[in-house]
Amino acid sequence: MAFRGNRRRLLYVMGKRANVIFVVFVFVLAPLFVSTALGQVQTRVRIIEASNVGSSIDPALRDVHDQLGSLFNFTSYRLLRDESLSLVPNRPSAINAHEGVSLEITLTKQQKKTAVYQIRILRKGSEILDTKVRLSPGKTALIGGPKHGQGSIILAISARF
């Protein structure tokens, strides 16, 4: 008879521990698995106007100023738009860049250390650029775009996953 009492108490304690583990999994760990399973990648897209009119740099672009200066021959950079997107593979997102120019960005593949994007720039519905970009977490890719005013559009794309 003493054995049955101990067995019941042991089963009761084990059941309580299993419930606690289940609750921890559901509320703490499951969201991590869900976002990984869905392949969501937090993506920042900045649309920059670059020109040789003046010599100013938008304070919001200080983190990419050195990259801009080493890749492009402009003296002035102004942020036109800053978008944060949560992208899922093979679902394009569109951004109206500026004056008839739009951007379509699609996460095509996500691996442990890289995200691959398909980037399309359209002017009045006609494609003017179609390229792929491979990014590591926390890195920024700069893409030279179409003419704009007295300069050009530059895209700064960053991934966080």
Image: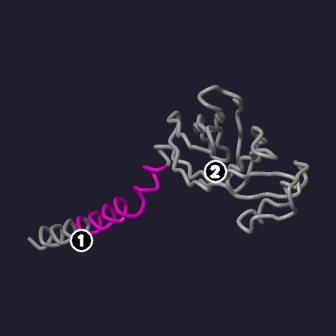
Check disc 2 and give the amino acid type: Val
Horizontally, residue 42 falls left or right of residue 76, namely: left
In what quadrant of the picture does the N terminus appear? bottom left
Q: Residue at x 23, y 65 (%)?
A: 15
Residue occupied by mark 1:
13
Q: Which residues are magenta?
A: 15-35
Residue occupied by mark 2:
45
Which quadrant of the structure image shows residue 133? top right
Q: Residue at x 73, y 54 (%)?
A: 139
Distance from disc 1 to disc 2, alpha carbons, whole Å, reads 52 Å
Check disc 1 and give the amino acid type: Val
Residue 142 x %, y %: 77, 47
Horizontally, residue 117 falls left or right of residue 55, namely: left
Q: Going from the N terminus, do you reach mark 1 or mark 2 first?
A: 1
Callout 1 touching callout 2 (CB < 8 Å): no
Q: Is residue 125 above or below residue 97?
A: above
Q: Is residue 66 above or below residue 38?
A: below
Which quadrant of the structure image shows residue 130? top right
Q: Residue at x 40, y 64 (%)?
A: 28
Label 1 Cα crowd, 10 Å radius (few <14 / some 14-19 / many 20+): few
Residue 97 x %, y %: 62, 45
Q: Residue at x 80, y 51 (%)?
A: 50
Display colour scheme: one colour
Residue 23 x %, y %: 31, 64
Label 2 Cα crowd, 10 Å radius (few <14 / some 14-19 / many 20+): many
Horizontally, residue 61 falls left or right of residue 22, namely: right
Horizontally, residue 142 falls left or right of residue 110, namely: right
**Between residues 70 and 108, which one lies in front from this camera angle?**
70
99 magenta-colored: no
Residue 89 x %, y %: 53, 37
